[in-house]
Amino acid sequence: MSNLISENQSEKTGQSEKASFFARARVAVKAWASGVRNGQKEKLREVRHRLKNRSKGERVIFAIVFLLFLLYTVSMLYPFIWMFINSFKPFTEFTLDMANGEAFAFPDVWRGENYTEVFSMIQTSDGTSFIGMTLNSIWQSVLPILVSTVTGTWFAYILSRFRFPGRNVIYAVIIFTMTVPVVGNTGGYFKLVYDLGLYNNPLFSVVTTIPFGGLAFMVYYGFFKNIPHSYAEAVYIDGGGEFTVFFRIMLPQAKPMIVALAITSFVGTWNDYMTPLLYLPSYSTIASGMYLVKNTLIRTGKNPLYYAGILVSMIPVLTIFLCFSNKMMESMSIGGLKG
């Protein structure tokens, strides 16, 4: 009986020691990541110090660059301000203002009904409503993120941490595929998708995101490659395996980066209209659907309704970007520049 009690106590002691080890390992990796951030903050302070002590010629160059960026910013905001003003106009008033050259004239009557009619009047030729387009945009944006995150982190970790025959060849092939122009392989890619039965099939959004490569791979690769291998060796000594190292040490440290890449991918997929048009014509997203209804709405004089639909479609991605832009930039610099 005493032997059994002592064995149970030793097992509990071993489990507590293992748990405390993983906690210490995570703290050590977090300290390493914090050191990287502190180093970047130090470089930022250096840059700010140089800016404060720049010469007269440097100040002139800085003023010119600032003016160029200001003009660029105004040119980017111009169409959105124009759309916002005209999205509140009645259809007839908009037509008259455009005929009289008063594109920036404020509405005589602010017609907020344009925004509510977006959900009832805008629909594609196959009957997909604006709400249906929104739902299609959601699943076509979320599914690729889930698949690419799982496959991308695994593959980048394996390629960055292990040495095996053909590793450099695989890495070179990935880099080469990133340099191939998309326009150059559209025909062959379309034929491949059709032959595999993925044309106009929701599985297209899953299967086509399994292949590895792209920006996400490069960021994950740089991040995992830069983490000291001593943390993994400590886990091996304690009896842990590769899965333990990946899921309990490495992956938790990559969470901010995963979130940043997921947001970037979501914004890009949400705004992509060409992919649904070519490969998923029966599942119109907001981007492809607004492209399809553009000519109809403009031809019937419902331009304000079209502009209201565009502005409504921007709300999700604009909100996400404004909320997480700082985290995205911070995670990109830690994972990409140090790799």
Image: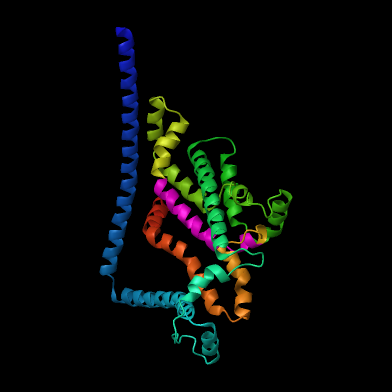
Quarter residue 131 falls in: bottom right
Residue 46 visible (yes or no)? yes
Tell me what residue is drawn at x 53 percent, y 75 percent. Answer: 305
Query: Residue 177 or 305: which is nearer the viewer?
Result: 305
Picture residue at 53% right of the left edge, 56% below the top: 138
For residue 334, above or below residue 182: above
By secondary structure, the bulk of the magenta-drawn segment is best described as helix
Q: Is residue 301 magenta?
A: no
- Quarter of the image for the N terminus: give it: top left
Foreground: 122 or 58? 122
| Residue 276 lies in the magenta stretch | yes
- Depicted 241 relative to depicted 72: above or below: above
The residue stretch that appears in magenta: 255-277
Q: Residue farthest to the bottom?
A: 100
Given residues 67 and 283, the one toward you in this image is 283
Q: Is residue 339 visible?
A: no
Q: Position of residue 17 (x, y in %)?
A: 31, 25
